[in-house]
Image (cartoon, helix red, strand yellow):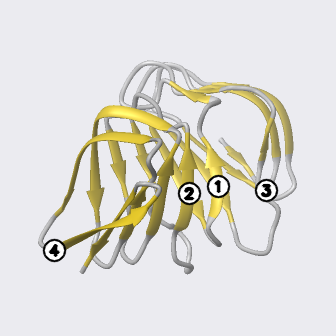
Amino acid sequence: VIDGLGSVSRNVTGTAAGEIFELNHGWIGSVSLGDGDDKFAYNEFAGLAGPSISGTIDGGSGWDTIALSVEGGRTVDLSDMVNFERVNTGNFTAGTSDVRLINVNGFAEIETALQAKLAIAQSSSPSATVRLAASTTLVLESSATVGWVGAASASIEAAQTGNPALSINVT
């Protein structure tokens, strides 16, 4: 199911199969993806208004992923997105992923793309594994809890940045 540029949908209900639902600059009420391994793609591009969600986005049972494509350092609140196990901030456009996430609660995996900038705040995912791609910057604000941070075949530099926040640069 795709909800494209400028589209309006009240509510969407998935099936037991694995669905992909993409929201680009449209308006949606609630989404219930149902059973299966589903993906909800949320796209917010620099210079354009982001999607509007007035209800809850429910991944249902299965291994469900929120795929974010966000540019320009915008803040995305995940509080209305429930029953998702993974969030991927990899940018699926030509731009560079640059996003601040709040209410990243109860996730098992948080993943970035190459050359991404990710900040996490006001979040509790104490069992989450944060996987960083090369040339990535991660900022964990003092209000964020994650279980583990790592990068495959890369070196990690960590620095205290104040308040107390932790900034991690992957090269």
Binning the other alpha carbons within 10 Å of mark 4 as few (below 14), some (14 to 19) or many (20 upward) gives: some
Callout 4 touching callout 2 (CB < 8 Å): no
* Among the two numbered marks 3 and 4 on one chain, the one whose residue lies closer to the N terminus: 3
Residue situated in front as seen by the camera: 99 or 90: 99
Q: Residue at x 47, y 42 (%)?
A: 143
Q: Residue 76: where, in percent of width, then height?
A: 63, 50
Q: Callout 2, which amino acid?
A: Arg
* Among the two numbered marks 2 and 1 on one chain, the one whose residue lies closer to the N terminus: 1
* Among the two numbered marks 3 and 1 on one chain, the one whose residue lies closer to the N terminus: 3
Q: Callout 4, which amino acid?
A: Ala
Q: Which residue is mark 3?
A: 25
Callout 2 touching callout 1 (CB < 8 Å): yes
32 relative position to 112: left or right:
right
**How far is mark 3 from mark 4, CA to CA?**
35 Å
Q: Which mark is residue 154?
A: 4
Q: Which residue is mark 2?
A: 100
